[in-house]
Structures are given as C-alpha cells and as structure tokens.
Amino acid sequence: MIDITKEVLLDLRELEPPEPFVQSLAALERLLPGQYLHLVHHRAPAMLYPELAPRGFVSQTQEHSSGLFHIVVWRETDDEAKNEALSQLERMANT
C-alpha cells in the first residue's frame, strides 16, 4: 500500500500575480482522494474563492498572528480531506 501525504503545501508568498492563482488551480486539479491543499500567502486569495465552488471545492481561511494567511481547500465530497484540513488549522491556531 502506498502512503499518500494528506497535505499538499503550496507557499505562494514570493509569487507575483497571477501565479498564486494559476498554481493554486493547477494544484487543486492534482489532488488525490483524501488530500487537501494548504496555501500559505501574505493575503487572502480573493480571486481564488469564487472559483472553488463551481469546481466542487470548499475552503477555510485562517489569518495567523504572523500576518500570514493559511488557506485549506478540499473537495466538497471528501470528508477525510475535510477532517484533516480542519485539524491542521486547529493545530496551527493552538501554536
């Protein structure tokens, strides 16, 4: 059995627009069942949010005390990925 990493981390802080948007959409299309996308950005990805629901994705955003935004995205029908993603945000909130 192959162990698949649940979190796909994408650090967008150093990218210029529209690269964060382009790379985020590309990464979402490659997610396997049980995986979620964890975006790290210096702002909320406003252009990405309206693109998620039509593609079947849901997101949760958390602004960290460092000023960074952590956005987790999973397929709407993937409860395993949802649980992992929300657990990750909870762990970060407690640090």
Image (spheres, helix red, strand yellow):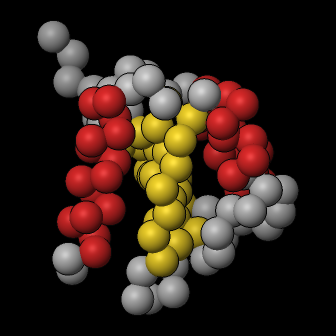
Visible in this render: residue 52? yes
Which residue lies most toward the top here?
A: 1
Q: Residue at x 69, y 45 (%)?
A: 23
* Depth order, front residue of 58/95: 58
User: Does the rendering let one see residue 26?
Assistant: no
Residue at the image point whose x is 44% and y is 24% from the top = 77
Q: Position of residue 49 (x, y in %)?
A: 69, 52
- The spot of residue 76 in percent (x, y) is 49, 30
Of residues 73 and 16, the one nearer the viewer is 73
Closer to the camera, 14 or 83? 83
Q: Measured from the top left, where is residue 26 in percent x and y?
A: 67, 35
Residue 82 as seen in the image, left or right of residue 43: left
Q: Residue at x 75, y 47 (%)?
A: 50
Residue 80, picture quadrant: top left
Quadrant in the picture for the N terminus = top left
Q: Residue at x 65, y 46 (%)?
A: 24
Q: Quadrant of the C terminus?
A: bottom left
